[in-house]
């Protein structure tokens, strides 16, 4: 264990760590899934319900790790050292030691993470054998889960959450993957990494403030399109918005030197 988190191993020469905050979100995800599975499948035993919740949560974070490995492997392929990957409360972050050497390198490094999540999600939904539009599973997975076997429930939930992970990370708020894609485009157009970073960071600040305000409204019962309403979901959106605001504001103040991590 170190200040960077708990070391759990190495994959392809990259050290994998988990932050203490990851343990908190793991417990929350397991609790949420166990409650959801228990409500949608009251006929299941407690062992099956909570066992499936634990397996689903661990596989989800395994998919987050694959998402981060996609970023890191592109960096390594381009000769950029990658120190480690840390899973934490908001997902994961790859500690990439150098800035990309070109707008094209930045674009490839950023886009492959969300694409990986979208591909994983699409494959899992197809394996679940669910007829109809996968977007319906994303909108109301609970209603569909009640009609499915444990294996199909697991595949469908993992598929839907990976699709959501991929779509969320395409939001053009720096330093999310979508913000890095935006920065690569701005970098190519302006020829300046500094200018591109500041513009993409400003967009990230605006999006973060919108998340904070929207989450606050959800806490007080206002329904936000796609996100819905409710105290727990609203509070979670506020926390994500605050995290994004802090990271974007830091890059806005300091430019590219604010950090070299690639998160998703």
Image (cartoon, grey):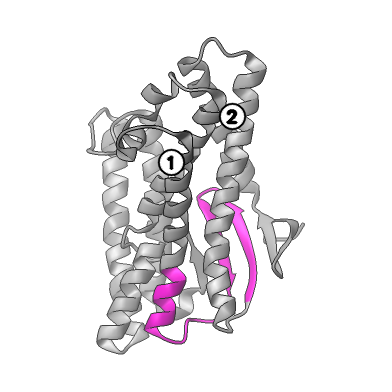
Of residues 22 and 184, which is closer to you in this image?
Answer: 184
On whether residue 90 falls in the magenta region, the answer is yes
Q: Are marks 1 and 2 in contact (CB under 8 Å)?
A: no
Q: Secondary structure at mark 2?
A: helix
Residues in magenta, as a range: 82-110
On whether residue 13 falls in the magenta region, the answer is no
Left or right side of 56 for 9: right
Q: Is residue 146 visible?
A: yes
Q: How many marks?
A: 2
Instruction: Please provide percent x and percent y for residue 170.
Output: 35, 59
Q: Is residue 254 visible?
A: no
Residue labelled with disc 1:
126
Instruction: Please provide percent x and percent y for residue 158.
Output: 50, 39
Residue labelled with disc 2:
53
State the image quarter where residue 199 is shown. Answer: bottom left
Instruction: Please provide percent x and percent y for residue 228.
Output: 28, 33
Left or right side of 190 for 130: right
Q: Earlier in the sequence, mark 1 or mark 2?
A: 2
Which residue lies most toward the top here? Answer: 43
C-alpha gap between disc 1 and disc 2: 21 Å
Q: Is residue 263 above or below residue 260?
A: above
């Amino acid at each position: 264990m170190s200040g960077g988190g708990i070391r759990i191993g190495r994959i392809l020469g990259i050290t994998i760590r988990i932050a203490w905050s990851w343990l908190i979100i793991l417990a929350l995800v397991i609790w949420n899934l166990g409650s959801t599975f228990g409500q949608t499948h009251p006929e299941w035993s407690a062992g099956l319900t909570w066992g499936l919740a634990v397996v689903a949560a661990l596989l989800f974070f395994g998919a987050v790790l694959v998402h981060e490995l996609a970023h890191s492997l592109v960096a390594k392929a381009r000769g950029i050292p990658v120190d480690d990957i840390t899973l934490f409360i908001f997902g994961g972050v790859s500690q990439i030691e150098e800035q990309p050497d070109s707008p094209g390198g930045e674009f490839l490094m950023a886009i492959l993470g969300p694409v990986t999540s979208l591909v994983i999600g699409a494959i899992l939904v197809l394996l679940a054998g669910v007829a109809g539009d996968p977007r319906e599973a994303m909108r109301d997975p609970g209603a569909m889960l009640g009609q499915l076997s444990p294996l199909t429930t697991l595949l469908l939930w993992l598929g839907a959450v990976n699709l959501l992970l991929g779509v969320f990370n395409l939001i053009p708020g720096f330093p999310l993957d979508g913000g890095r894609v935006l920065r690569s485009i701005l970098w190519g157009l302006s020829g300046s990494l500094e200018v591109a970073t500041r513009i993409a960071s400003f967009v990230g600040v605006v999006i973060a403030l919108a998340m904070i305000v929207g989450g606050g409204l959800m806490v007080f019962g206002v329904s936000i399109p796609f996100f819905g309403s409710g105290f727990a979901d609203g509070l979670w959106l506020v926390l994500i918005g605050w995290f994004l605001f802090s990271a974007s504001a830091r890059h806005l103040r300091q430019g590219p030197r604010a950090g070299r991590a690639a998160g998703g």
